[in-house]
Image: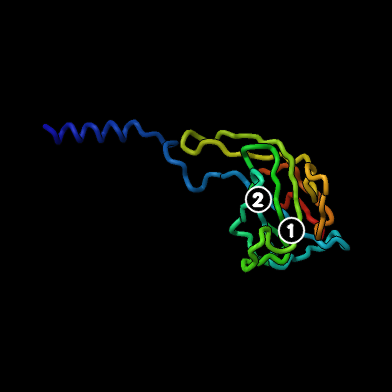
């Protein structure tokens, strides 16, 4: 008798499962902001940064983005905050893990202001966010000193952050 009860419960469970109860790995996720670096003297020529490290500034604390610490590159993908409509970063040229001072290297502030648009994917996958950039600055507008070191300008190329297939922001250095 117990076998039939267990079998009945299994059949009921399988019958009640819907296709959207499991989020497939191929489902879109919230895109990161694609930043490309260009030569300040020739704004059409990409320029590598040696030993780049990037920190997210959150609640007056610096959190290192692990994928971007000490890399040599001309482009990066960084996550924008989804709990408020601004993101602050410290981009550090000449970054080194050996330095105990945070931020390590030659830091410069980058500030983004944007709208967050939530999109419902499914019951299992939940929501993803798309962003609409409205402002990008090579300094923190809330900081009275407005320190600038090696970044000369930040230019929005594509204000709609809906995928990671194209550059959204150009940084001149």
* C-alpha distance separating marks 1 and 2: 12 Å
Would you name the residue on which mark 1 appears?
A: 107
Q: Is residue 129 visible?
A: yes
Determine whether, in the image, residue 173 is placed left or right of residue 129.
right
Residue with the most extreme left position? 1
> Percent position (x, y) of residue 125?
49, 39
- Compared to 105, does 164 lie above or below? above
**Can residue 156 be seen at all in this image of the molecule?**
no
Q: For the point 88% across and 63% down, which residue is it?
A: 41
- Horizontally, residue 11 falls left or right of residue 46, namely left
Q: Position of residue 98 (x, y in %)?
A: 62, 68
Q: Which residue is nearer to you in this view: 4 or 77?
A: 77
In the picture of the structure, the residue carrying the numbered disc 2 is: 56
Front residue of 21 and 91: 91
Circle 2 sits in a helix, a strand or a loop, which is it?
strand
Left/right placement of residue 91 relative to residue 152 reads left
Residue at the image position 80 percent from the left and 47 percent from the top: 137
Count neighbours of disc 1 (C-alpha within 10 A) and say few if under 14, some if 14 to 19, many if 20 or more. Answer: many
Which residue is depicted at the point 66% across and 37% down? Answer: 84
Looking at the image, which residue sits at the far right?
Answer: 41
Q: Residue furthest front?
A: 101
């Amino acid at each position: 008798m117990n076998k039939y009860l267990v079998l009945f419960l299994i059949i009921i469970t399988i019958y009640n499962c819907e296709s959207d109860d499991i989020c497939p790995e191929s489902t879109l996720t919230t895109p990161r902001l694609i930043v490309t670096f260009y030569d300040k003297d020739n704004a059409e020529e990409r320029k590598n940064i040696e030993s780049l490290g990037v920190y997210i500034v959150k609640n007056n604390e610096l959190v290192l983005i692990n994928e971007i610490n000490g890399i040599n590159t001309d482009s990066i993908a960084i996550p924008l905050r989804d709990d408020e409509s601004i993101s602050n970063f410290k981009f550090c040229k000449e970054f080194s893990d050996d330095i105990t001072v945070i931020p390590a290297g030659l830091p410069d502030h980058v500030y983004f202001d944007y709208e967050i648009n939530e999109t419902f994917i499914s019951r299992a996958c939940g929501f993803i966010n798309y962003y609409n950039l409205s402002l990008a600055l090579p300094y923190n507008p809330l900081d009275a000193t407005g320190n600038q070191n090696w970044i000369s300008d930040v230019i929005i190329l594509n204000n709609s952050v809906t995928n990671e297939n194209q550059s959204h922001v150009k940084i001149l250095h």
